[in-house]
Amino acid sequence: MADPFEVRMRFTSLLHHLNASTTSALKAAHYALKHAEYADDLHSCILEQLERNNMNNRANIMYFLPALCDTARAKSDAGGVGAGAGEVYVRMMERDILRIVDAVAPDDGSGAANVKVVRRVLQGLQGKAYLQPQTVTELEECIQGRDTANAASSPGHNHAGAHTDGAMHGVVRSTPRSSARDSLSHYPVQRLDKRQIEQRIEEDRERHKRAREGIWAIPQESTSLREDVEFDKMWTEGEGDEDDLLLAREESEDRGRGLEYEET
Amino acid sequence: MYNRGPGYGPGYGYPPQHSPYGQPGHPQQGYPSHGPSPLHGGYPPQHSPYPYQQGQPAQPGVQYYQPRPSRQPGVGPPHSGGHTPQRGGPAQRGGRGHFANLSWTPGDGVKGGHLVQPGEKTREGSASAPQGQKDPDPEDEDNPFRPPADLRADDESKKKKVTPIGSAGKIGAIAKTAAEKEAEAEKEKNRISFSIKGRASQQSAPADRTASVILKPDTSPLVAKKAPAPVSPLVQTSVPKSSNYVGNTRIERKPSPPPTRKETVRKKRLKTRPVLSEDFKASESVYYRKTGNESVVGSGTYGKVYKGVHVYTARGVALKKIRMEGERDGFPVTATREIKLLQSLNHTNVVALQEVMVEKNDCFMVFEYLSHDLTGLLNHPSFTLTPAHKKHLAKQMFEGLDYLHRRGVLHRDIKAANILISKTGILKFADFGLARFYEKRRKQDYTNRVITIWYRSPELLLGETQYGPAVDIWSAACVLVEIFTRHAIFPGDGGEINQLDKIYNVLGTPSRSDWPAISELMWYELLRPTNRIPSTFKEKYGERVSSEAFELLQAMFLYDPASRPTAADVLEHPYFTHEEPKPQQVWELDQLEGDWHEFESKALRKEKEKADKEARRREREVSDQKRKADDTAGGPQEKRIKTAEVPA
């Protein structure tokens, strides 16, 4: 049995070194699952890191959550040792989601760049039924104003504490102040430095590249060949237009040239 | 021959379904009247014995030859297979045009069966042919300049002529013989025809040993006789098989022969055989290139581009070597994509991919060679473009771009160095390494790590992944500025942040009203400007370009991609349609010495920098020595000087 302190240290380091690659996320997720007996501890580790690190890292941890949930779900589905323990992470994540969101995209404007990350991840979590649609809707409202947040020192700032209070009880509340942030006057107090921005750009590109890997796939609901979704899609969307005509003309010219050559 | 009524009948054991063929008089409709036509080749095998069963003693040759459409009885052309036809000239075409397809004609000015050189000097009666027969020309026979195919083609046309006049009996004899005998006869004919040709050429151009004469089939006296053959079955029966064939070949030509014996003789003069230069001879590749790095005309992440020359056609090519180093998954999929794209493109303003070549384990894309690229041309030390030239180049650029976009292709790497210019001032887009087909009808996600950063549009810099042709328009606008001013408009330091700053500094910071969707972009929050900057575009460029050109640039440099004009819109702009001067092709490039690509101008610059550095170093050395001499006295003074020197 590993020393709890050591497990905590290792996991912290793994979270800290998360990047856009799948492997880094999976590595951390497997580690968390392997030490599911310290689930509480490791979960608090996640929260801690979310609140301590720079915005890039917070985004990476946010993207890590779905991976953790997936791994946990897969493990509990597979059964075996500590099968139930995996679900603990999902439950805890669900419980603290507001706190997590607040950490990743704080409403002081510093996390404006992360708002899109939060939205995306929340959509993903909802899609996989780790979160209730209602919760997600409420969270969306909550972060609504934050990406327009030129709002570093806008009045809403001091209320940030109230959020975390609510989050600790697992009660999701919509924030009444988000609408109040219309004054477009200030810029974020601390912008990411240049190196961080460039790193973030690269990481986003990497994530996007992976996301695109599956983009061509068309989900086939039925196994019956009679209902071919791909074919239907082409049938409905692929009507010909003047471009196809152009293509056809070029091809026929090509063909004509070939024939001419053969005939002579 | 099938229609030789008397011999036919059900009694011959024809399968019932074939009986109609045997009926006299029928065949004209059912069969093409010419015996050894290619159609016969297609008959099921069970037909071939028919002729043998015919009890017609008068036509033994027919029986033998019938199943072999390529050899005509009597005529017995000495050609083998599909070798001759392309040289055969019109005479043969009617009869054996179908063979022409099988063989490739060397590009010597003769395409297919057409003679390119019309009758040169001689109008020669057919009568001359038999004469020639008696008058062999030894000189011609061993003429080393005459390719064998030529000879044979010639022979054939001769023979047709010869047969009727000379030897009806001989034909019969040949026909009767077995295959070996036939071959012999062919040889003999060969000889005969050699002499004929020799004679002809001597007559027409005694000094010119290269001439080979092809006599028109019309010269043959047979023609007149033969022509009616297909009309009447009776004639056919009476005419020997061989002549029948000739008659058939004549059918198409029949209207053309004038009644007089005078004929235009088409003559063909062989070009002197090209001789390869020593370099070309030594070249292991069909595309000769200079050794080592001498032939490199470009290099990049994709690999290197070499200049090459086809050793036989002397055509210039650019060979783009596909980089295979570090490819773990075999042939790079990006190269496959590029090849596929280029193969589907066909436009004057898009560089033509001629072939893909594998050589010594290297794969090359072979392009037409163009002497200059836009960067090289704009950096040329002395050559300058007139406003009319610039307009012509710009027009071609947008015509090419319009074509690409209409074909659903995003170039995604438009920049001055990727635009080639020919010696006649034709502009062509090159380097489709980043290009892709895009969905016109719906938005799709593409990578935004595209386009050389100086030419990258603001939406890409801010993280847009659902973009369209507007990104190419932005790049083209950047290039247009370069055409006008010879300088890049947004020369950033290579980073996204700095690049956006460069753009903001010229065009001002974008406002929400200019570009409503800006806040939706992924990195908007990361990269948003820190303070408002007004546009300085007008003061920077208003004076340097014409008013319409400025207006056009302004339209293309709009922040919101949805508001930018399409390439087709650009071509409609008054800058192209109304404003003077009219576009004018850069013919002057023809006189420009050397090739001007980015590669060369870079090398030139490097050389210059090196020389500058060297000069500065020497200067410093001199001053150092001087200082040393000075410094022997005072310590602190030395230190002060040293620090002062560092930045230098």
Image: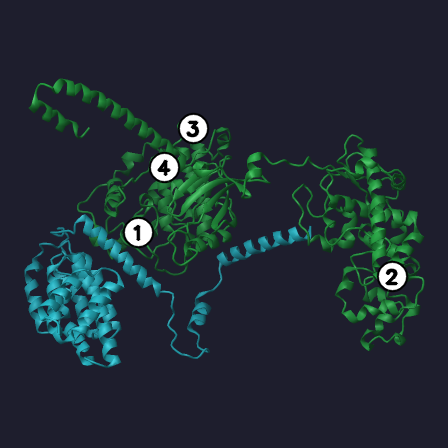
Chain colours: A cyan, B green
* Residue drawn at the location 8% of the way across and 20% of the way down: B634
Label 3 resides on the chain identified as B
Q: What residue type is labelled 3?
A: Phe
Depicted A201 relative to depicted B368: above or below: below
The spot of residue B637 in percent (x, y) is 8, 23
Closer to viewer: mark 4 or mark 3: 3
Closer mark to the observer between disc 3 and disc 2: 2
Q: Are the residues under marks 4 and 3 on the same chain?
A: yes
Report the chain holding disc 2. B
Do tag 1 and tag 3 residues touch (Cβ < 8 Å)?
A: no
In the rendered structure, which amino acid carries the disc numbered 2?
A: Val
Q: Can you identify the residue that label 2 sits on?
A: B62
Mark 2 element type: helix
Disc 4 marks which amino acid?
Glu
Tag 1, which secondary structure?
Answer: helix
**SS label for mark 3:** loop
Q: What residue type is labelled 1?
A: Leu
Distance between mark 1 and mark 4 Cα atoms: 21 Å
Q: Can residue B272 be seen at all in this image of the molecule?
A: yes
| Residue B211 locus on image (x, y percent) | 76, 36
Front-most of residues B187 and B110: B187
**B354 or A9, which is in the foreground?**
A9
Tell me the subunit letter for badge 1.
Answer: B
Q: Is residue A147 visible?
A: no
Q: Residue B460 carries which label?
A: 1
Q: Name the residue under label 4.
A: B482
What is the CA distance from the residue labelled 4 to the residue labelled 3? 15 Å
Host chain of mark 4: B
